[in-house]
Image (cartoon, rainbow, N blue to C red):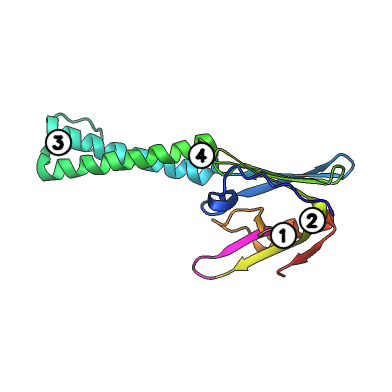
Amino acid sequence: MQKHSVCFVCDSEYLMGNGSSMTTSTTINKGDRLLHQNVLGSRRFSNYWWATIVTLGASGFLLSGISSYLKVNLLIVSDPTQLVFVPQGLVMGLYGAAGLLLATYLWLVIVLDVGGGYNEFNQETGAIKIFRWGFPGKNRRIQIDSRIEDVQSVLIDVKEGLNPRRALYLRIQGRRDIPLTRVGQPLSLTELETEGAKLARFLGVSLEGL
């Protein structure tokens, strides 16, 4: 039996498995011998939406604090010059500064496309490559290389309740389960079963968890 090779550039959050959700788009080509799944990471509409809302809100608070201190109205929709700088204006300014730090983090995650990447299964070479983008530094490139012959099954993990979890995992001999989808906003059961069945058929292994 050939040994599978594993390249861990980072073990942080195990292939970005915790956090916001990811969706996949599947492409099968080269005579149905190559399965390529593009994985959407942080560049999702919901992340753009929240980053924009936080930026606007934090900017408003910060400008209100500055307006209260300078007694010059820097806003269009209200007049914060009537506020007493200590403590009202000062507190609003601090909220605004903290909000802008959070907004900067959100935009940075989007620009870096944290969690984005792909899953690739090549029957011609027998190779599996799971790739994700991380944060700058040694964690930036997260990659696992393995062999199709070492795959035991495809696992569907479903947990309902207040914090539902619906995800696909790849079970490989001698390794812990490798997440193929993110855990945040779960996929629908229909989509999860379809993707899981398609991958299991392609790899010639069983589908577990149903």
Q: Are marks 2 and 1 in contact (CB under 8 Å)?
A: yes
Query: Mark 4 — residue?
Result: 135
Please tell me how crowded label 2 is: few (under 14), some (14-19), or many (20+) other residues with Cα within 10 Å: some
Q: Earlier in the sequence, mark 3 or mark 4?
A: 3
Secondary structure under tag 1 reads loop
Q: Earlier in the sequence, mark 2 or mark 1?
A: 2
Q: Quarter holding the N terminus?
A: bottom right
- Position of residue 201 in the picture relative to residue 44 (left or right): right
What separation in Å lies between label 3 and label 2 (alpha carbons)? 65 Å
Please check the rendered image and state whether residue 95 is part of the magenta-colored stretch, yes or no.
Answer: no
Residue displayed at 34% across by 39% down: 101
Amino acid of disc 3: Ser
Q: Which label lies toward us, 3 or 4? A: 4
Please tell me how crowded label 4 is: few (under 14), some (14-19), or many (20+) other residues with Cα within 10 Å: some
What separation in Å lies between label 2 and label 4 (alpha carbons)? 30 Å
Report the span colored magenta: 161-170
Query: Mark 2 — residue?
Result: 150
Secondary structure under tag 3 reads helix
Query: Mark 3 — residue?
Result: 68
The picture quadrant where one finds residue 61 is: top left
Secondary structure under tag 4 reads loop
Query: Mark 1 — residue?
Result: 174
